[in-house]
Image (cartoon, grey):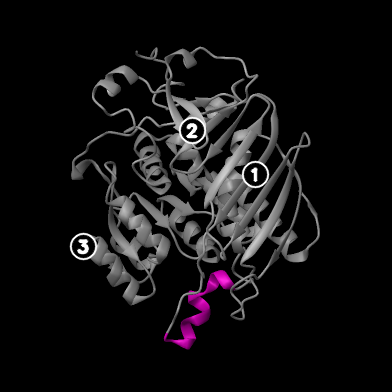
Amino acid sequence: MTVPHDPARRDFFIQAAGALTAIAIVPELLARSASTADKLPLALVGCGRQGRAIIAECAKLDNATLVAVCDLIESRRNGALRQAPDAEAFESLEALLAKRTDIAGVIIATPTHLHKDLALAALAAGKHVYCEAPLAHTEEDCKAIAAAAAKAQPKQIFAVGLEGRSNPVYKLARTFFRSDAVRDLVSIQAQQYQKTSWRVPSSDPAREKELNWRLDPATSLGLTGEWGVHALDVVLWYTDRKPVSVFGSGSIRMHNDGRTVHDTIAMSLMLEGGVTMTYHASLANSFEGRYELLRGTNAAIKLGWTHGWMFKEADAPTQGWEVYANRQQFHNDEGITLIADATKLASQGKLKDGVGLPNSSLYYALWDFADAIANNKQPACDAQAGAQTSIIAIKAAQAITSGEPMKL
């Protein structure tokens, strides 16, 4: 059977069972092609861990290409050129902008505390800017970047790498969340667990502090800012509720290596209307990884960055599409799967092919940035939205460090 062609409901799987219905939400995948001449020339500043991930995703883009890379450290520049052999390497953004006047946009993937000066320089040179999140490590820097970006509009695009807003799964799930499918919001929880160190080994003691900026409270927002900002933004974007207050705690549970930045945190964000978001993160354990879970009176939506699910309550009203569902097991519940043109896909034995994203969230954020430039439109997350969420993350980090509740 084939589902009626409804843009808000197409291309997603639904899994349901007895008391609960689990819906695996599938995006409409971006399938386009472009010649190299059609691709926007971009430059990358910062060739560390995130920079390397950006280079890998840029290689897949059909609407942009990386033509220049920039980093103070020679070994990182050389590593970037091995990934992107057609790019040109520079030691400074100033030198890059002076020579490569053909560049349309600059991607900033340096440590957070260096974002402001680079962003302002790129804007002053007339370039479009994509800046990794959080936007900055202080409220003052966030406001300065947002003000410069606003002044550069509408000629220049400024996008912030809060990836949920451009993620096809998250965009589709949001249409369900903001309908009667979920109804009245009950609670929100999110987490990111990944057993890792954050410490970068260095044979040069002089570079030790520079490389391990994440472990320095003067330059790092810790888990709340570097990780939690993404979950915070998803919740603020989904709910449109103003944050009221935040409190939390942190500790070192595993990495007793002299650091003072917590390796484990717990945070509670109070939103208007009495709804609470709880967030946990740790570098000491990996169980269940990263997700956001929003519970409503009709259903709950769980988002896992490459996948999304909706669990319906037993007393939730049917919405019509359930009759097209094909039953499937989901953990301990029997469910139903649903996708546009399900009959055709089933006959081809490809019913499960549409589940999940073929690319990372980073890919879609970069694609959206290039698309916004090409079509002169607002990016999924602009400087204003990025600054607002980053400032909340900054306040949350302060609350966790101080141990005192903070009004927002």
Residue on which the image places disc 1: 189
Q: Please state which amino acid type lies under the numbered disc 2.
A: Lys
Disc 3, SS: loop
Q: Main secondary structure of the magenta part?
A: helix
In primary-sequence order, the first of circles 3 and 2 is 3
Which label lies toward us, 1 or 3?
1
In this view, the residue in front, 216 or 381, is 216
Q: Real-space Cα distance between discs 3 and 2?
A: 34 Å
Residue on which the image places disc 2: 171
Magenta extent: 203-215
Residue depicted at x 61% and y 47%: 190
Q: Is residue 213 magenta?
A: yes
Q: Check residue 148 in the rendering and tell me which mark sits there, or answer none.
A: none
Residue depicted at x 42% and y 60%: 50
In this view, the residue in front, 326 or 277, is 326
Can residue 183 be seen at all in this image of the molecule?
yes
Q: Please state which amino acid type lies under the numbered disc 3.
A: Pro
Q: Is residue 375 magenta?
A: no
In this view, the residue in front, 280 or 226, is 280
Q: Is residue 247 above or below residue 5?
A: below
Percent from the top left, x then y, of residue 122?
43, 56
Mark 3 Cα within 10 Å, few/some/many (few <14, many 20+)? some
Mark 1 Cα within 10 Å, few/some/many (few <14, many 20+)? some
Can residue 341 be seen at all in this image of the molecule?
no
Which label lies toward us, 3 or 2?
2
Q: Check residue 85 in the rendering and tell me which mark sits there, or answer none.
A: 3
In this image, 61 relative to 332: left or right?
left
Quadrant housing the N terminus: top left
In primary-sequence order, the first of circles 2 and 1 is 2
Q: Is residue 176 above or below residue 124?
A: above
